[in-house]
Amino acid sequence: MKILLSKPGLDGHDVGVKVLAHALKNAGFKVIYTGLRKSVDKILDIAEAHDVDAIGLSILSGTHLIIAENLKQAMEKRNLHFKWVVGGNIPQRDVDALMRFGPDRVFPTGTQIQDVIIYFDSIKKK
Amino acid sequence: MTEINKKAILKDVFLESGISVKPLYTRKDIESFDIESELPGQYPFTRGIHAEMYRKRPFTIRQYAGFASPEETNERFHFLLKNGQTGLNVAFDLPTQCGLDSDSAEAVGEVGRVGMTVDSLNDFEIAFKNIDLNKITVSLTINGSAIVLIAMYIALAEKWGYDISQLRGTAQNDILKEFIGRGTWIFPVDKSVKLVIDTIEYCAQNVPNYSPVSVCGYHIRESGANPIQEMAYAFCIAKAYSDGTIKRGLHIDEFASRLSFNFDIYGNFFEQIAKFRGGRKLWAKIIREEYHSENDKSCWMRMIAGGGGGGLTKEQPENNIIRSAYYALVSALSGTQTMALCSYDEAYTIPTEKAAEISLRTMQILIHEMGICDTVDPLGGSYYVEALTNQFEKEIREEMKKVDEWGGIVNAVAKGKIQESVSKQAYERELGRQNGDIPKVGLNIFKREEEAKSVDFHPYNAAAAELQIAKVKRLRKERNNVLVNTLLNQIKEDAIADKNLMPSIIAAVKAYATVGEIIGLLKDCYGEFDEPIFF
């Protein structure tokens, strides 16, 4: 099970995504991290190149809706079907709007690390 | 084992820095130090950099602010000034911080979102309208593109007829910490440091009252460093900038008095105070003993120290008001020069006006109601605080030696060594918070069952972003483009010749060359940083 963790947009807050990278690695997943400021196309390139099982987007600057829409469109255009999730500073009121762009799950600030691990375990089994 | 330990079977206590804390400190713990002779305003300044400290003038209050458009920012500045704030701390949006113009494809959705947008000098002219640059000290929170924004501030002052040899102000401009945390780096590490040194050299020679760099332990700590590492890495960074400036032929006393620091406050109360007192002493010794400074002012560890976002929680956010008040007290008891507090809603949004006002009032209550300004260094002589201060001085020095073993801070950052170790600590810290080893009220102890879901958010102003984009497009048509191109070419030539870029950038921004154009051409010359990935 290979997970790509990514930082789309210009947001430089990477403490959370690196915490999660450590946690998922320790939980036995293979983790790839893109580094900061990657476009959605670049993220999809990396996802394809490594044939990952899921993509995680970490967004804390407030641009989650715009980026999610961009990713959805880019995947449609390129006929890609990655399972993807969004984590970060996502206000509760934006979660429904965000889900309409097709992520499998949204993990707002305050999510327990264990819950993220349980989620990835659950998609591994399917 | 001491008497007290035998009776109560007390648990061992370790500070975040790993220092063990005894249940009682007595005269014996400080007997070997020469505390009696230490006085505020005298080298090595453990008790404060000024003899009278806040009795003469309280710390400066300087909240971080900056909203969307330069017009809105100007309004906010006038609001803060009317409410008694004495300094301005400007936040910029991410495109400006990353050196992109508002109309760039990468800037979509980000224009004006986390701070003010600046494309050209025209935006500064609007943002600082009717603000007397002689009376107010403006702090620019900018790093990757700092050389352009500092040049713009100097250009603005010159254009408005100020004497720049008297101009005051501060820029964050600490690129090395951006590689460790915060992330708005642009160029490779060596070129990034070169640009910082250009600003130090230029300011020392032309704008001597301007503080071109504020070295930030703050973001390093937020990224996972403990309080010892926060100070040690910041000092290593300040030394790297100093070494580079000295290589240009300047003497330490020509610029060191204008270097300042930005530190973080959260966690253990006394640990933070000792961190600052011990750090201040060590920095003074480094500048005097290693750099042979003959000027006391060069030895001052001047700082802005405020409440750190890392201590705040999204859960029960009102508790953050209480936390911030304690952080403010720590900062004042540590002899800070300037204070800024994270607002209670800052764990999940840009502060609302109400939250920003509470932060301002918190600091004003401390100054005007608590008697905090009456006497200098009131904790001086405390057995515990002095013992811990002494320990911090030693431990920070030890940590700095480790960086030397990595080949120095520039090398350690370029290779990702520091990033690797702090991100691992951030993971351990988060685990501790999630499993309750690190108690956080409202988060892992004394939790409320039902969390109130409705919280106020600072709204994003999409219309303002559209106006800003239209404005920069219009600017490109209306300005003298022949002149702009000539001046941009000059920057390129100076970059290739490895000259100080400040003069040519100041000339270009005066002709309304944009941030994106200047940073863009420097990317062509220098390339971009290739981020080492560690976790």
Image (spheres, grey):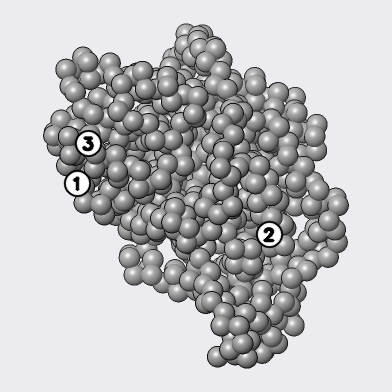
Q: Say whether residue B226 is left or right of residue A103.
A: right
Which quadrant holds the N terminus of chain B? Answer: bottom right
- Check disc 3 and report the residue beneath it: A123
Q: Chain of mark 3?
A: A
- Check disc 1 and report the residue beneath it: A30
- Check disc 2 and report the residue beneath it: B330
Residue found 35% across the figure and 48% down from its top? A114
Residue found 42% across the figure and 41% down from its top? A111
Instruction: Locate residue B370, reporting x and y percent.
Output: 83, 56
Q: Chain of mark 2?
A: B
Report the number of numbered marks: 3
Q: Which comes sooner in the sequence, label 3 or label 1? A: 1
- Closer to the camera in the image, B488 or A57: A57
Q: Say whether residue B183 is left or right of residue A104.
A: right
Other-residue count near label 2 (Cα within 10 Å), few / some / many at <14 / 14–19 / ≥20: many
Question: How far apart are the two marked residues, 3 and 1, measured between alpha carbons?
Answer: 14 Å
- Closer to the camera in the image, B209 or B223: B223
Residue B491 visible here: no
| Type of the residue with mark 3 | Ile
**Discs 1/2, front:** 1
Question: How far apart are the two marked residues, 2 and 3, measured between alpha carbons?
Answer: 47 Å
Quick one: SS at disc 2? helix
**Discs 2/3, front:** 3
- Does mark 1 fall on the same chain as mark 3? yes
Q: Say whether residue A102 is left or right of residue B158.
A: left
Other-residue count near label 3 (Cα within 10 Å), few / some / many at <14 / 14–19 / ≥20: few
Rendered view: B417 above or below A45 = below
Disc 3 to disc 1: CB gap under 8 Å: no
- Closer to the camera in the image, B435 or B203: B435
| Type of the residue with mark 1 | Lys
